[in-house]
Amino acid sequence: MAAQREGSRTVGRRARATRKHTLLDRADRLLIEAMGERDPRERFRAAYLAALRGAGAVLAITTASAPTRAKSRSAWVLMARAAPEFVMWSDYFAGFSATRAALEAGISRDVTGAEADEFCLRVTAFLHDVEDLIGDESRLRPAAATDMSA
């Protein structure tokens, strides 16, 4: 029975590892797509979606033991709660949520080329921080697991 529980924990860890990497890969692809957009509004929108995927990767790491039903559905609120070191990023991106929602709804919002470019740069920095977190998290294996692989 203990072996079965340990096996399911291992499968759970692998699933989270796969999910976080998948989300980060999607974020990278969306950011590349964003940078190729000529329309600043589309560049902004795609970059925002990349940031959301990055937040998803953070949540995939940090919410493994969290309750399954959170009151808030905002990725930025959830990320701030789950990873306090990302509160600054959460606040930054939450400040652009209304712009993103308006663009998604087809409501005209002015986004200049310079604003979209700056936003892409910020998303790039955020995704680097997410990548650093994922890298750090993967090194935090229990000592027994490290000893067995040596």
Image: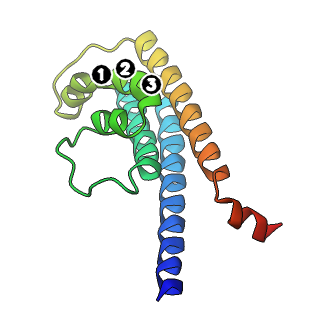
Q: Secondary structure at mark 3?
A: loop
Q: Residue at x 40, y 56 (%)?
A: 64
Picture quadrant of residue 72: top left
Q: Residue 138 vs residue 117: left or right?
A: right
Q: Residue 108 vs residue 122: left or right?
A: left
Percent coordinates x, y for residue 51 in the rendering:
42, 35
Q: Secondary structure at mark 1?
A: loop
Residue position marked by numbered label 3 in the rendering: 38
Is tag 3's residue or tag 2's residue first in the polypeptide sequence?
3
Q: Residue 62 vs residue 135: left or right?
A: left
Please identify, in this view, whether the residue under mark 3 or under mark 2 is nearer the observer. 2
Residue position marked by numbered label 2 in the rendering: 92
Percent coordinates x, y for residue 22 in the rendering:
51, 55
Query: Neighbour class for label 2 at 10 Å: few (<14), some, many (≥20)?
Result: few
What is the CA distance from the residue labelled 3 to the residue labelled 1? 20 Å
Residue type at mark 1: give it. Phe
| Front in this rendered view, residue 64 or 121 | 64
Q: Residue at x 70, y 66 (%)?
A: 144
Residue position marked by numbered label 1 in the rendering: 96
> Label for residue 129?
none
